[in-house]
Image (tube, grey):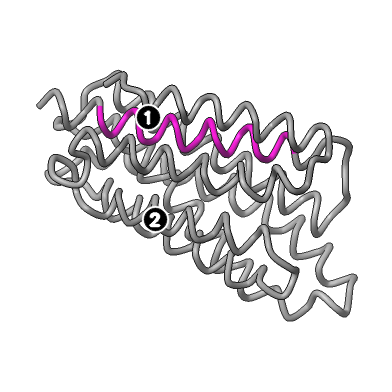
Amino acid sequence: MLNIWLFLFVLLALLDWVALWQAWKQVNYFSKPVTLLALLIWFTSLGGWLVAPFWFGLALVFSLLGDIFLLLADKFFLMGLGAFLLAHAGYVLGFTPQSTTSPLPTLIIGLITLLLGSYFYNKLRKSIANNAGLKKMNMPLLLYCLALCLMLFSAVLTFAQPNWLPAAAALVTAGGMLFFTSDSLLAHNRFIMPFPNAKLLIRITYHLAQLALVSGILLNYLNR
């Protein structure tokens, strides 16, 4: 699974993190999208579109579009949100069980995910309610939160699927959790309360999330 595109992704991610840390805006305009582009090419170079459900490739394409939109002015924020919502939908469809899963693990994972998502969205909703200018964001954020929770649920559920290798399931589970963490940090910083080094922490957890998800997917489908 190791090739030049994976190493390039790592180098570009490091450059992107340094650019954020040092506030190199011009560098960041380049480093953010090309980092995910390198990950997409890595996925493609190993035959990811052919061996795995094509929904995973679409999830990466929509993630790249989301990265680009979120780099632009605030008026493109909803477009970025929509692109990442479609990215989560792609991951969910890709993780859809191909065989019947045990109801008990499904119920437990579902309840934990629901409680986690409900807790965070409730904090977000209260903050939005106190800001008249943000009330229009309530429905888009609710839909996005549901998509994010469903992605996390479907990623963790791979542990209960016989067609997923344990190591691959562990990687995509870690990726789902990191993605949830990254988006939670972004929402907290933007809509609840800004905090130090927020953008850097959001970007690090986001890149690690995508790397874990793609690594788990490739590990599983290249070794079947």
Q: Describe the element under mark 2 as helix, strand or loop.
A: helix
Up-down: is 201 above or below 122? above
Residue found 49% across the figure and 60% down from its top: 65
The answer to whether residue 27 is left or right of residue 209 is right
The answer to whether residue 16 is left or right of residue 223 is right
Q: Position of residue 64 (x, y in %)?
A: 48, 54
Instruction: Tell me which corner region of the image, top left, top right, bottom left or bottom right, holds residue 58.
Output: bottom left
- Of 134 and 20, which appears nearest the observer? 20
Q: Quadrant of the C terminus?
A: top left
Q: Residues within 10 Å of mark 2 (few under 14, many from 20)?
A: many
- Of 82 and 10, which appears nearest the observer? 10
- Tag 2: residue type? Val
Can residue 141 be found in the magenta stretch?
no
Q: Describe the element under mark 1 as helix, strand or loop.
A: helix
The answer to whether residue 25 is left or right of residue 10 is right
Residue position marked by numbered label 1 in the rendering: 5
Residue 61: mark: 2
